[in-house]
Amino acid sequence: MAKTGVFESDPMVMTKATELKKELQRLVRNIVDDEDYRTETIDQARETLFALKELKMKRRSLSLKLRETVLCPEEFKCPLSKELMRDPVVLSTGQTYDRPFIQKWLKAGNRTCPLTQQVLSHTILTPNLLIREMISQWCESQGLELPDLAQHVNEEGITEADRDHFLSLLEKLSLTLPEQKDAAREVRLLTKKMPSFRALFGESLEAIPQLLRPLSELKSRSSIYPDLQEDIITTLLNLSIHDSNKKLVAETPMVIPLLMEALMSGTIETRTNAAAALFTLSALDSNKTLIGKSGALKPLIDLLEEGHPLAMKDVASAVFNLCIIHENKGRAVRDGAVKVIMTKIMNGTHVDELLAILAVLASHQKVVDELGDLGAVPCLLRIIRENTCDRNKENCIAILHTICLNDRTKRRAMREEESAYGTISKLARNGTSRAKRKANGILERLNRAVNLTHTA
């Protein structure tokens, strides 16, 4: 039997394993000794145990690589990794690869076969049982131990049992309503607790459409089942958290229309989670453009106007993120964002978040005109005087600076404020670096206008 001592002596790995074992002992001792232990302690113990298992599996996998002293046959090597395949799968072109490496290729957005460059008709990966058996026999003849497929954990922590369960849940989503509801609830819970389950949705282009089928097949809003809708929309939120899924989720044709539908109907949790999903997906600039073109800003702004306290932060975050790109600023303005936001600010509702959006939108010329009509200048000056938050003061003065540059009729109100309270001068001395710069810019404009008047 080949030696395993090389890996066992790795000091970093051994130290990490020792730390995990000590932490697990501490947590188990708390559970056993303290009758009033917290449920969080059990969760922490479970997470520590999983981390220990994952480390063990990685050690086992690396140890196997080190023991492959004999060159394996070329047909047993993955064309991508050039290493012995652990989980050989067949692509639609008939080529065989090791599952983790072809999954990585597909998740990077590739839709061709790495060897033949053929466009894939689908991305379903079929286990190559014949090659698997041949590799197993070869390993046995060489005294090497190939991990049991049922126990094999790839870089995402996914087992074959996980994958089988995942596929069975997707199948249930096309069956009767009770089965759809049960499956949707379980998928929601699993994608919340297990990052590996989120990753599974990236393995096939059909997985997300299968998830959405119960909602996409409904003929009218009145036929929506609120609990089913909530579970599916929340699952989309869970999936969008996984970085590798963001592009795939947003570009699946049914996703954004169903999120927009959810913003307008269903439970408040459904609407909130739909907004949160749009926020998370908009981390990618390409998704910002796609979401904006789809018309999602209008239902977001409508929900913002409703002002439900549970939804406000997620909605504001989504609008802010989307409006970072220029074309979405114009869309938000046309959809009535400025009036909604300014009204909320004047009422003292979520001032922090809404000022941040307004500061982003202020570079759009139509925003300056609207703010003047809405009486924004005295409101923003009052916030600078009375609010203690440096970021709020900075956003206010940035908006006022844009107004000062583009609307001369509002400079009088700023001069009057300066004469009465010295608000802008104080910020020029004591504000953040950006606030000082904007405040000094306004003061220069105001002083220049006064000097020109005196000269005339």
Image (tube, grey):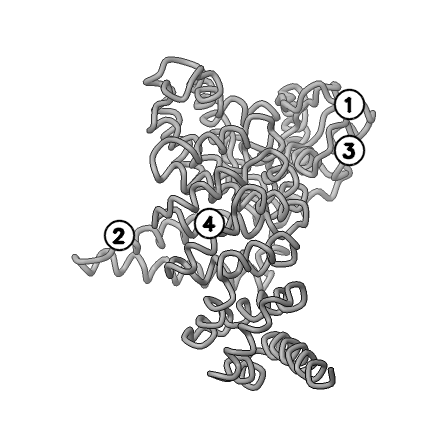
What is the quadrant of the C terminus in the image? Answer: bottom right
Foreground pick, 265 / 273: 265
* Label 3 Cα crowd, 10 Å radius (few <14 / some 14-19 / many 20+): some
Of marks 4 and 2, the one in the foreground: 4
**For residue 128, above or below residue 444:** above
> CA–CA distance between discs 1 and 4?
48 Å
Residue in the picture at 66% in, 36% down: 107
Which amino acid does the dot numbered 4 rest on? Answer: Val
**Secondary structure of residue under mark 2:** helix
Farthest residue, direction left: 35
Residue in the picture at 41% in, 13% down: 175
Foreground pick, 243 / 414: 414
Which amino acid does the dot numbered 1 rest on? Answer: Val
Residue in the picture at 58% in, 67% down: 410
- What is the total number of numbered labels drawn onto the structure image? 4
* Mark 2 or mark 1, earlier in chain: 2
The disc at residue 39 is 2
Q: Is residue 247 left or right of residue 277?
A: right
The disc at residue 119 is 1
* Mark 4 or mark 2, earlier in chain: 2
* Residue labelled with disc 3: 79
**For residue 39, above or below residue 394:** above
**Secondary structure of residue under mark 4:** helix
* Residue labelled with disc 4: 340
* Label 2 Cα crowd, 10 Å radius (few <14 / some 14-19 / many 20+): few
Whether tag 4 and tag 3 are in contact, CB under 8 A, the answer is no
> CA–CA distance between discs 3 and 2?
47 Å
